[in-house]
Structure formats: C-alpha cells, structure tokens
Amino acid sequence: MSDFPGASDAFPGAPTGPRTGSRPRVLAAMSGGVDSAVAAARAVEAGHEVTGVHLALSANPQSFRTGARGCCTIEDSRDARRAADVIGIPFYVWDLAERFRADVVDDFIDEYRAGRTPNPCLRCNEKIKFAALLDRALALGFDAVCTGHYASVRVAADGRRELHRASDAAKDQSYVLGVLDDRQLAHALFPLGDTEATKDEVRAEAERRGLAVARKPDSHDICFIADGDTQGFLARHLGAAEGDILDQDGTRIGTHQGAHGFTIGQRRGLRIGHPAPDGKPRYVLDISPVDNTVTVGPAEALDIAELTAIRPRWCGGTAPDGAGRYTAQLRAHGAETPVTAEVVDGELRVTFDAPVRGVAPGQAVVLYDGTRVVGSATIARTTSATRAAGRAGA
C-alpha cells in the first residue's frame, strides 16, 4: 500500500485515496470516549469510508478501570458501539489483549523492576495503536487509522508528513505520539488536532450529533490498574522486599518495602522517622534496584542539567545532524524548556539551558522545533546540576 500523495480539504494532513474513483478506507479506533467518537464522525464527513473498531485489551475487562476512568472496559466497548450506530458506520471489536499484556503491562512491570518510571500510555500508542492496529489495518486493505488524539499532521514542502502540536494547547497529546515514525504518520489521521476546536467545543459537537458520550468524563490514570493503586499493583507483581532509605552521604535513615514503590522527585509517603537537620522536606533522588535502596535529599538536589536518552525515534524524519536548538517536554502535560540536543553514538544527549527537576529514567523526552515534533527517546541517565557545574569548573 503506497503512502498518501496529498491532503484533504476537510482537515490538513488527511489522506486522499490512492485508488482512482474510490474513497479512502479509514479504520477509526473508538475507545468509547467522546474524542474518538467525534473523530470518527468527522472522518465520515470528510468523505472517507470509515469502519469503527474497539480494542479489547484485557482477557478480563472487569479487571480494568470502569466508567469514566477507563478506556478498555466492556462498558467502553458498548459506548463505542452505540456511537458507531449513531454515526452509521460498521463496528467491530478486535482482541489485542495478549499483545497489550506483553507490550504494555509486562513492560510497565519490568521497567519498575529496573528502577525506571515508564509511561504506559506512550507505550500503548507506539506498540498497540500505531503498530499492531495499523499493521492489521493495512493488511486488511485500510488506508489509514483515525484516532481522537489532539495533535496535527501536516504535509511539508518536500511531501513528508510532520507531527505538530494541537491547536488547543490544553489538550495537546503530541508528547505521547512522539514515537511515531514516518511510515506511521503517513497512515495516521487526527481530525481533532487539525482544527481550532477546544475540548468543550468537541463535547458540544458530540451533543449536536446525538452522541451519548458527549458528557462522559475523560479517562484518567492507568487503565489496567483497576483500583488506581499503582504501588499496590506493583507490590502484587514484584513482591515486598525490605530495603534501606539513605540520605545523600549514605547514612541509613529509614526502611521501605520495595524500591518499586518510589519515583524520582517523590515527597509524600517516605515515612522517614528522622527529620532532616535543616527541617526541610526530603525528596527521592535515586532508586537502586540492584541493592534495593532509595536515596533521599533536599529539593535542590533534584536539579538536572543534562540527560542521556536511548532508543530515539524520529517523528516523520531522520536524526538531526549535529547539535541543534530545540525545546524539550518531559511529561505528558509538562512545560517546554529550551535545550541543546545531539545524537552521539546512537544516544540522544540533551543539555538544558536552565536546570529542571523531577527527571526520572524511563520517562520520555520529546524534542520540538516550534510546534513540530522532532522525535522521542527514553531517558536512561541524568547529570545533576551540581555535578555538571563541578565538571565545568574543573
């Protein structure tokens, strides 16, 4: 299946059909929420031949979050089916539970076991929605996958697809899509991010279309942790293992029941019996799964000047040539910060203009050039501002 040669007038970046006299066939991933339902409806209005599909991601859907806080439950499947009926498109449920377990849930557990803090939503977009789903869609003769993400696909002067931030900055989801490569972008539709509509306007549009999900609250947290207790989930899968809580000079000041229960920058829940000499709060500075220790210290010790990230993926292009100036985002809803970045021996090296805090291995760093997403990589190592300053002054 060849890539799409042009853009639709309905929304920039939408594919036009590669077949003469035939409408493009679009597979709309419908989670059961308002965003994906309106995206599917807009794809129909754009003239595409749309089929809706809901992804069954658990062999036991009742183990996933229910109601407004989920995206993969039986209830969500029913909401998606009702929306498809109103829109007037065929609808199917695809079982990707085994793939989701291996690529998202098991990966989440393994990352915490290794002392890293993963983003399961980013992994789901990479491995499920734009790998497993897209590959199956193309094999079945579909031309594109449509989702309700708030991001924008644009066509550059040279014909390449580019991923840009959504017009509604408050809902922008380009961070979790930064793992998409050129091939995946060429078969991706994001009708919501390509227009000026805000989330409130999307809900109003759903009301006008008669979609019952118009007032359904957004999903939150991690869908496969039914009760929202991430530490409890990890304890069940990784087990309790008492270890030491250390201060910066290595003095034992407390104990814990598993290093996997902590994240870099965490302040609450440390349960340290000994207050700091200066009386100030202490934060998690380091997690060592090898010796099951957690190191804590003052807030200023969280300041990071540099990071090294692995497994870089370039979004709609190739790796940058040499050092360049970008902005970086470190969390799904985090602020941008100016950086200098370059690829060295296959790793992404990022230097911040000003120190940032709470950066943990396992998180994604996403680079931007203006609104354009350059690429994404997984943080492997960080360099504290204190260490960087000492090295510069040596």
Image (cartoon, rainbow, N blue to C red):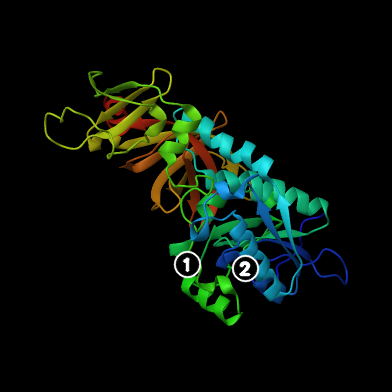
Q: As displayed, is residue 11 above or below residue 30?
A: below
Q: Looking at this view, is 41 or 48 the one in front?
A: 41
Residue where numbered disc 1 is placed? 168
In the rendered image, the quadrant that contains the N terminus is bottom right
Percent position (x, y) of residue 174? 53, 55
Q: Looking at this view, is 355 or 297 the one in front?
A: 297
Percent position (x, y) of residue 274? 16, 27
Say which quarter of the image contains residue 207: bottom right
Q: Which numbered disc covers residue 197?
A: none
Percent position (x, y) of residue 14? 69, 66
Check whether the beta carbons of the residues at disc 1 and disc 2 lie within 8 A of each other: no
Q: As displayed, is residue 192 above or below residue 96?
A: below
In the rendered image, the quadrant that contains the C terminus is top left
**Which amino acid type is marked by label 2?**
Ala
**Which amino acid type is marked by label 1?**
Asp
Depth check, mark 1 against mark 2: the one in front is 2
Instruction: Check disc 1 and report its element: helix, strand or loop.
Output: loop
Q: In this view, does 76 lie to the left or right of 186?
A: left
Residue where numbered disc 2 is placed? 37
Instruction: Check disc 2 and report its element: helix, strand or loop.
Output: helix
Q: As displayed, is residue 165 above or below residue 114?
A: below
